[in-house]
Image: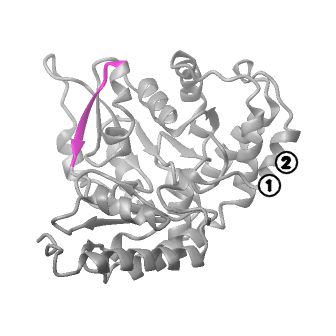
Amino acid sequence: MQPPIDLRSDTVTHPTERMRDAIRRAEVGDDVYGEDPTVNRLQELAAGLLGKEVGLFMPTGTMSNLVALLTHCQRGDEVILGDEAHILHSEVSGYTLGGLSARPVPNGRGFPDLQAVEAAIRPPSLYGPRTGLLCLENTHNRCGGTVVSPQQMAAAGALARRSNLPLHVDGARIFNAALAQGVPAADLARDATSISFCFSKGLSAPAGSILLGDRAFIERARRTRRMVGGGMRQVGVLAAAALVALAEMVDRLAEDHAHARLLAERLAPLPGLELDLDTVQTNIVAFRFTVANLSPEAFMARLRERGVLISAHAGRRLRAVTHHGIERAHVLRAAEVFEAVLGELALPSAAAPLR
């Protein structure tokens, strides 16, 4: 039996053989003491690639974002972020652990209107929370993998500096954003006070994320990481795989983008789906299931029966993500399965699509 075509997320990638070899040979030490040489090399390399002073290795992207928020803000502060932000919807409101609150603004296609952001910044007051941080996301997960440009980042950075606010970027897929625009990742990080990115998504490492910023911020973040349980010991075994990821897996992200575009072009004409091709800019294909008499979950179950796995967002929104291990043949087969299942739903007994 063939394994399923797993398009649920790029987190399902497996480490490459080169990563497995690097894990086995990794030189290690105690990272809490700053003595793991492989982690130290990774932190230095990642900081250089994104134009930041220092990096801090983390177990997950969620912890990277949490540590950034808790380090930048004080208890009672409010964080401005888009209303579709991963931090808001998919990280279990971790910011509440630090007594922080979220102030969402309309997200647009992944980059909020800066006039709305400026209007959300609170003036000093005895009665309301202090605005402590502005957060952006690049690429933007729930908006379909859309990218934020260097020009947009520069505008957001100027607003943050003018308002005396730090700017944190959830850059889990920052190399996807850079590759899609043909710019160095450092161009997308230049205006950020801090930025995080993941090794365990399209870069295919088994685990890990990194938080980057200036030296003073990262020293405070190191203490915050310890506070939330992120102090790790001989973690060079994971950092070794991340080093291979940075050396060998960044440029190949272009394959994922091409495969996502191919899948989107095959799905867009199909009845029962609403898909905006303009949002397919990287490796995520987001669409809406519109057949009225069948739930998205039931539709996903029918796809699963035929060997195709996808994931769901809120409402009737669904998502397919291309990644290492998904080839052109898998994409074409997945599109055929979509067409077959939707064709069955188009029988006279099926309801018309939602309007």
The answer to whether 214 appears left or right of 42 in the picture is left
Residue 321's spot in the image, x, y percent?
Answer: 48, 62
**Nearest the camera: 222 or 201?**
201
Residues at circles 2 and 1 in contact by the CB criterion of under 8 Å: yes
Q: Quadrant of the N terminus?
A: bottom right
Q: Is 313 located above or below residue 302 in the figure?
A: above
Residue 318 lies, with reference to residue 241, above or below; the image says: below
| Whether residue 40 is visible | no
x and y percent of residue 262 in the render?
A: 48, 79
The residue closer to the viewer here, 92 or 147, is 92
Q: Is residue 43 left or right of residue 159?
A: right
Q: Residues within 10 Å of mark 1 (few under 14, many from 20)?
A: few
Between 160 and 79, which is closer to the camera in this rendering? 79
Q: Which residues are magenta?
A: 98-105
| Residue type at tag 2 | Asp
Packing grade of label 2 (10 A; few <14, some 14-19, many >=20) is few
Q: Which residue is mark 2?
A: 21
Task: Answer above or below: position of 302 versus 80.
Answer: below
Q: What's the CA distance linking mark 2 and mark 1?
A: 6 Å
Q: Is residue 354 magenta?
A: no
Amino acid type at mark 1: Glu
Q: Residue at x 46, y 68 (%)?
A: 306
Picture residue at 55% right of the left edge, 23% below the top? 225
Q: Mark 1 highlights which residue? A: 17
